[in-house]
Image (tube, rainbow, N blue to C red):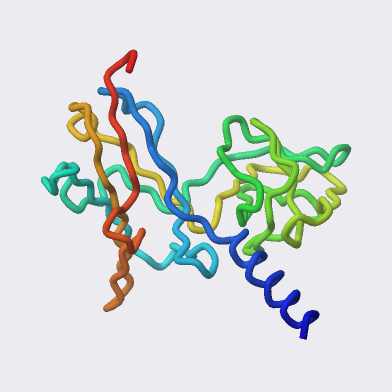
């Protein structure tokens, strides 16, 4: 019985380590330079957004609409180019914003992926640095062995990732806000986060 309970506890902890909730976004009034990035995960792993139309909505703390549902400025699965090293097995993608454990998909145009990687395959990010990362076939596992650097242009994206480039109007006034992404595919419509509290967004005046 104790062994069974231990296994169940381990399974629950493992599942929770994969799940990602909304990350609070903090902005300075007027700051539209860097898009907000979130990973859509309803608790059972990141959602493949390739078949969804994604829109963003934002409201002030009193419920007033700040950004009506829009696809303007929204990018599902934003991609970033990378280079690879067969010596270190690391990928280099400056300012990638990938986090440990994120599920990553790679692709190539005009050539071939680094040997050891395959397109349309989910890898897990490990050994993540500010501008570098490694990929593993399992969560927290060993680096994929890269035997060459590939050719052409290599790209990656995080499964479930979506970004919103704030409009000037959205961050014009200091205050507390909430945001949601709406995912539509055919007749299916889902809102993330499902909570009424949404993504917490704080817009501050400079120096506060």
Query: In the image, 172: left or right of 129?
Result: left
Query: In the image, 58: left or right of 155?
Result: left
Q: Residue furthest top?
A: 207
Quadrant of residue 131 in the image?
Answer: top right
Seen in the picture, residue 189 relative to 168 is either above or below; the reply is below
Q: Quadrant of the N terminus?
A: bottom right
Q: Residue furthest bottom?
A: 1
In this view, the residue in front, 9 or 40, is 9
Residue at the (62%, 54%) spot, across then down: 104
Quadrant of residue 171 in the image?
Answer: top left
Q: Position of residue 168 (x, y in %)?
A: 22, 29
In this view, the residue in front, 177 or 143, is 177
Residue at the (88%, 38%) spot, across then down: 87
- What is the count of numbered marks? 0
Q: Position of residue 32 (x, y in %)?
A: 32, 28
Query: In the image, 66: left or right of 88?
Result: left
Q: Residue furthest left?
A: 64
Query: In the image, 105: left or right of 61?
Result: right
Q: Position of residue 84 (x, y in %)?
A: 75, 40
Residue at the (27%, 59%) spot, across then down: 196
Q: Quadrant of the C terminus?
A: top left
Q: Position of residue 112 (x, y in %)?
A: 72, 51
Residue at the (42%, 51%) spot, across then down: 22
């Amino acid at each position: 019985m104790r062994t069974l309970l231990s296994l169940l506890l381990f399974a629950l902890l493992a599942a929770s380590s994969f799940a990602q909730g909304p990350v609070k976004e903090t902005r300075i009034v007027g700051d539209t330079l860097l898009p907000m990035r979130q990973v859509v995960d309803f608790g059972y792993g990141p959602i493949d957004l390739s078949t969804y139309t994604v829109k963003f909505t934002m409201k002030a703390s009193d419920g007033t609409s700040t950004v009506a549902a829009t696809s303007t400025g929204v990018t599902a699965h934003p991609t970033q180019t990378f280079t690879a090293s067969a010596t270190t097995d690391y990928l280099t993608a400056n300012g990638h914003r990938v986090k440990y454990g994120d599920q990553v998909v790679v692709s190539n145009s005009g050539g071939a992926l680094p040997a050891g990687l395959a397109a349309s395959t989910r890898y897990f990010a490990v050994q993540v640095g500010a501008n570098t990362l490694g990929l593993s076939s399992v969560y927290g596992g060993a680096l994929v062995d890269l035997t060459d650097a590939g050719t052409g242009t290599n790209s990656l994206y995080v499964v479930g990732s979506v970004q919103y480039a704030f409009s000037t109007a959205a961050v014009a006034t200091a205050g507390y806000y909430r945001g949601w992404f709406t995912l539509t595919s055919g007749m299916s419509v889902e809102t993330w986060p499902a909570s009424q509290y949404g993504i917490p967004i704080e817009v501050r005046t400079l120096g506060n």
